Amino acid sequence: ISRIYRVKLDQDMLFFDAETQRGRESFIVPWRHDRAEEYDEHGKALLDVRDNRYIIPNVFDLPDRDRQELTRYIYW
């Protein structure tokens, strides 16, 4: 993931609109600790409802607004 355009919480599910290496995608991640894990020193790995893995190599490389959108819900 190189950009996060929007994250919306609805019924304990996070609805992502993000830019990936395959282009702009929408996916759903359950809002649970086991669905967002540490990846390297500053990254995150997100596991969606279909067990697809989305990698953010470094959260600090995201634009400020994108990082705020993510950390509003993924703060661990």
Image (tube, rainbow, N blue to C red):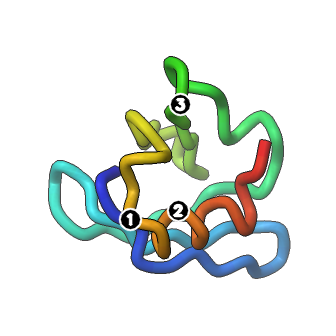
Amino acid type at mark 3: His
Name the residue: 41% across, 77% down: 5
Asked if residue 41 lies left or right of residue 52, the reply is right
Asked if residue 26 lies left or right of residue 21, the reply is right
Residue that label 2 marks? 67
Residue that label 3 marks? 42
Asked if residue 23 lies left or right of residue 4, the reply is left
Secondary element under disc 1, as helix, strand or loop, is loop
From this viewpoint, which residue is outermost toward the left?
22
Where residue 30 appears, as percent x and y from the top left, is: 72, 56
Which quadrant of the view contains residue 23? bottom left
Disc 2 crowd rating (10 Å Cα; few below 14, some 14-19, many 20+) is some
The answer to whether residue 55 shows anywhere in this view is: no
Name the residue: 49% across, 45% down: 59
Between the C-alphas of marks 1 and 2, the distance is 6 Å
Residue that label 1 marks? 63
Secondary element under disc 3, as helix, strand or loop, is loop
Where residue 39 appears, as percent x and y from the top left, is: 53, 24
The answer to whether residue 39 shows anywhere in this view is: yes
